[in-house]
């Protein structure tokens, strides 16, 4: 059961309809705390992640409150603190108000100066329709219920997957360090690889959701490499750059690499290769492919979320039919295949995923961008109409 | 005769290329230099060459309709219509493309050609697996491998140890369809491949006869690895990038620079006078698309300017030319410098960059950003790094394919029908065909 569900739904759809990634109820905990299990500090009702023109992600914090006596300006100050902690770009505070207790205009201006949009539930429809012009986001395909359903149902039906589901669909999103997140997602997936059955729609949706989550730090990496090296055509150059970023700097990489070497040597074996992500060659090829069109890395997680939710609601074909970019579909498929192989998921996972994507890619390639086909269609339509007129 | 493996071929007297990568690269070169001509003796070699040709041009591409790819392959990449499908199937077997099919019809080709792993080795392995190269194909590969290093005299080719009749036939095919040209020099036949040496084959033939083969081979190899070094520095130090040169090799370099087939770019400065910069031979048609020749020449001018700063600077030497060019590409400028106006004059005249005065006698070099200039800098970086000799994709075509069909069709419209010339069969084959027909008729 989602608390303040309606407000969260409004914000979630608003974010997603703008082509952003979004997640509901993201718990925040101290990353480097002293307790064994760091207690939750607070949670973000709806976290928006949007691509910037500089090939970076920007965080937008969405805060929803239905307590009618909540002080709007206190809420703004609270969310501003959270914004600082998360290094977010801006925030939206969406409040339900009682009659005659409207938010004061000066308080709205005060909020705006702090990078916070302070808005009442009753005003939000007009705001939304102006930003997502003209129809607004209420018709956007995905609902928070589908996200919540996937998160809770898989967890309750398959206890061995509960922790992973909760982590990949909630906790992981609060990790600001994307290098750590990139490695952890693969590690966590490998922990549960024996539990996942891609023939089940809910498991397949979870796999796509995990690939979507992986796509976020991966896009950060793509942007980082592109800004520093554009499109390296030497493997050694790309490899060196990526290793340093993924392991948090040269010094840290050398430390981990030496540690790994000693651990393997202690077991009486000789480490043949340097420390690297699983399926390292495939990873470099995937990254290099994205560098041809790096902005597509910042659209991939959204696409995979769409398809994942589509799989669980039986609407994957409809979700895919809204995507007209064959290169985006192609790269998203390759990213998902990489995640499946790196996590060593059952072998048929790749075939199942390919089947989902290939039919859309195929139909797009056959129909779109084909003037002859369009002309033919137009001719057929014209003939159909004229025949109708004749009758 | 078909050899099942390398040992059999070696026993026969041939020297099979050491790796599959070599077979794939040379097959590609034969295919490209052959244009629309084909020899009846060639089968697997053409399939493999066609697969390599497609792979190079499909790297980084979005999914593409098979019939569009077929048109592009036939009208733009020089494949025959019947060669496209086997080539695509080799790519699929090598797991470099996925195919979306309906029955036996291929609808869509979904490419994932590797950027870094050795696609030539993989294609060479797949392309020759179960379709062993026949005697003529193997000899052709070996011939091309030798011609890539340096021109060959008839005596050089005799050391191949191959069957004389087969060798003559391969040379005859090569001359007819274009992957070998012959020149007479000082009473000798000299064989040159236009794939590797585009400039003045007559002068090169003359040199191949006068210079000892191994010396010429070493010099050409060193020049490919260390492009654009100043001739004066090479002569004065008797070395090229730390490699000691003997008097014969120095003489070869001087001859290469003076006889007109490696015209070296020159830069004149007040402090260092006029200097010539020497490059490896300009790659031929299988390495550079015809519309890229100017880009290649511009890159030579840029590399010369950078080498000037590296070896013959007045005050501020360039310590890492590759890094400097990389920064030039990323930032779009080089920091102000008093030597820039003289050093980069040719670069400015060719429209690659402009010099912006920053006061006094100092100027900053700014890249004029357009597609060709960015490729010029890319190519200059590759040259400074040492030519890899890998074939280059047709950039114009790749861009068109990325943008969609309406961009591809105008390119294809330049040529409406694919031609196919079949090389006349040799005498023995003609006799065998006549015999077959006679027996069939009786």
Image (cartoon, coloured by chain):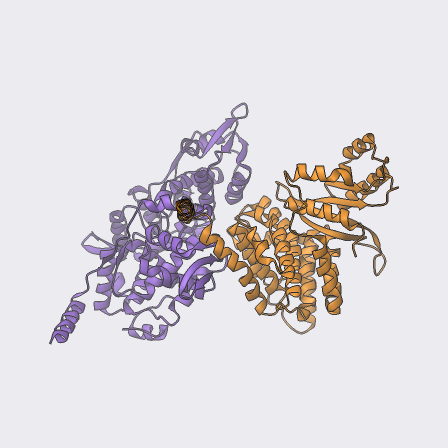
Residue B275, relative to residue A195: is it above or below? Answer: above
- Residue A95 x, y percent position in the rendering: 81, 42
Residue B26, can we see it? no
Examine the image and state in which quarter residue A166 appears.
bottom right
Q: Which residue is more in the foreground, B80 or A166?
A: A166
Examine the image and state in which quarter residue B407 appears.
top left
Q: Colour of chain A?
A: orange
Q: Quadrant of the C terminus of chain B?
A: bottom left
- Residue A375 x, y percent position in the rendering: 40, 46
- Residue A285 x, y percent position in the rendering: 54, 57
Q: Which residue is more in the foreground, B158 or B69?
A: B69
Q: Quadrant of the N terminus of chain B?
A: bottom left
- Residue B10 x, y percent position in the rendering: 33, 72
Residue A201, relative to residue B243: is it above or below? Answer: below
Residue A115, can we see it? yes
Residue A290, relative to residue B346: is it above or below? Answer: below
Q: Which residue is at a point 59% across and 65% down the rendered structure image?
A: A341
Q: Which one of the lettered chains is coloured purple?
A: B
Q: Which residue is more in the foreground, B146 or A66?
A: A66
Count of number-bearing discs: 0
Q: Residue furthest front?
A: A391
Q: Residue furthest right?
A: A69
Examine the image and state in which quarter residue B163 appears.
bottom left
Q: Which residue is more in the foreground, A135 or B24?
A: A135
A140 displayed left or right of A333 = right
């Amino acid at each position: 059961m989602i608390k303040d569900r309606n407000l969260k739904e409004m914000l979630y759809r608003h974010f997603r309809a703008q082509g952003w990634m979004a997640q509901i109820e993201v718990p925040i905990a101290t990353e480097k705390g002293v307790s064994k299990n760091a207690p939750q500090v607070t949670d973000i009702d709806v976290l928006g992640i949007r691509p910037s023109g500089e090939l970076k992600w920007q965080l937008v914090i969405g805060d929803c409150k239905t307590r009618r006596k909540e002080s709007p300006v206190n809420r703004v100050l609270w969310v501003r603190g959270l914004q600082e902690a998360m290094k977010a770009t801006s925030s939206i505070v969406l409040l339900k108000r009682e009659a005659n207790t409207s938010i004061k205009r000066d308080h709205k201006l005060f909020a705006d100066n702090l990078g916070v949009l302070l808005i009442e539930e009753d005003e939000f429809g007009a705001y939304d329709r102006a930003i997502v012009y003209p129809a607004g986001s209420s018709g956007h395909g995905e609902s928070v219920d589908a996200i919540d359903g996937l998160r809770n149902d898989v967890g309750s039906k398959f206890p061995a997957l509960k922790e992973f589901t909760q982590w990949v669909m909630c906790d992981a999103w609060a990790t600001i360090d994307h290098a750590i997140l990139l490695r952890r997602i693969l590690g966590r997936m490998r922990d549960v690889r024996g539990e996942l059955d891609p023939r089940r729609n809910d498991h397949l949706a979870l796999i796509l959701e995990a690939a979507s989550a992986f796509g976020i730090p991966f896009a950060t990496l793509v942007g980082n490499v592109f800004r520093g090296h554009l499109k390296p055509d030497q493997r050694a150059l790309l490899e060196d750059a990526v290793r340093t970023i993924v392991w948090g700097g040269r010094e840290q990489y050398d430390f981990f690499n030496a540690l790994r070497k000693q651990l393997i040597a202690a077991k009486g074996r000789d480490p043949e290769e340097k420390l690297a992500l699983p399926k390292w060659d495939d990873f470099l090829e995937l990254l290099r492919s994205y560098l041809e069109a790096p902005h597509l890395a910042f659209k991939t997680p959204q696409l995979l979320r769409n398809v994942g939710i589509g799989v669980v609601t039986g609407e994957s074909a409809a979700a895919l039919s809204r995507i007209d970019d064959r290169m985006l579909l192609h790269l998203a498929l390759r990213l998902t295949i990489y995640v499946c192989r790196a996590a060593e998921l059952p072998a048929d996972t790749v075939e199942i995923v390919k089947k989902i994507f290939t039919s859309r890619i195929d139909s797009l390639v056959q129909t779109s961008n084909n003037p002859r086909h369009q002309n033919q269609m137009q001719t057929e339509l014209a003939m159909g109409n004229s025949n109708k007129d004749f009758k | 005769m078909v050899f099942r493996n390398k040992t059999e071929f070696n026993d026969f007297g041939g020297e099979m290329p050491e790796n599959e990568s070599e077979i794939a690269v040379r097959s590609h070169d034969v295919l490209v230099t052959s244009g629309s001509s084909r020899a009846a003796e060639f089968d697997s070699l053409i399939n493999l060459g066609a697969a390599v040709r497609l792979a190079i041009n499909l790297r980084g591409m979005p999914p593409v309709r098979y019939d569009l790819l077929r048109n592009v392959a036939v009208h733009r990449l020089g494949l025959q219509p019947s060669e496209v499908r086997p080539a695509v199937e080799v790519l699929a077997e090598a797991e470099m493309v996925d195919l979306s099919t309906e029955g036996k019809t291929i609808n869509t080709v979904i490419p994932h050609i590797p950027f870094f792993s050795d696609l030539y080795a993989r294609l060479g392995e797949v392309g020759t697996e179960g379709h062993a190269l026949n005697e003529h194909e193997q000899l052709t590969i070996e011939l091309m491998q030798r011609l890539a290093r340096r021109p060959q005299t008839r005596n050089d080719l005799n050391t191949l140890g191959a069957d004389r009749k087969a060798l003559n036939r391969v040379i005859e095919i090569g001359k007819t369809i274009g992957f070998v040209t012959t020149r007479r020099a000082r009473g000798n036949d000299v064989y040159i491949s236009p794939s590797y040496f585009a400039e003045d084959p007559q002068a090169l033939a003359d040199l191949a006869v006068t210079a000892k083969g191994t010396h010429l081979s070493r010099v050409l190899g060193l020049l490919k690895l260390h492009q654009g070094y100043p001739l004066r520095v090479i002569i004065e130090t008797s070395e090229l990038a730390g490699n000691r040169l003997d008097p014969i090799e120095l003489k070869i370099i001087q001859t290469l620079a003076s006889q007109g087939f490696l015209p070296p770019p020159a830069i004149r400065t007040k402090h260092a006078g006029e200097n010539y910069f020497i490059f490896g031979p300009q790659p031929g048609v299988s390495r550079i698309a015809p519309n890229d020749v100017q880009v290649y020449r511009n890159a030579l001018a840029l590399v010369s300017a950078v080498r000037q700063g590296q070896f013959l600077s007045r005050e501020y030497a360039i310590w890492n030319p590759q890094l400097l060019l990389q920064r030039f590409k990323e930032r779009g400028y080089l920091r102000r410098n008093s030597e820039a106006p003289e050093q980069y004059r040719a670069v400015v005249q060719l429209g690659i960059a402009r010099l912006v005065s920053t006061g006094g006698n100092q100027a900053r070099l700014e890249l004029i950003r357009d597609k060709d200039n960015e490729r010029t800098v890319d190519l200059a970086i590759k040259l400074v790094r040492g030519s890899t000799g890998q074939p280059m994709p047709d950039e114009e075509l790749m861009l068109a394919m990325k943008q969609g069909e309406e961009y591809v069709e105008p390119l294809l419209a330049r040529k409406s029908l694919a031609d196919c010339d079949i090389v006349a069969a040799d005498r023995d084959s003609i006799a065998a065909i006549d015999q077959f027909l006679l027996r069939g008729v009786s």
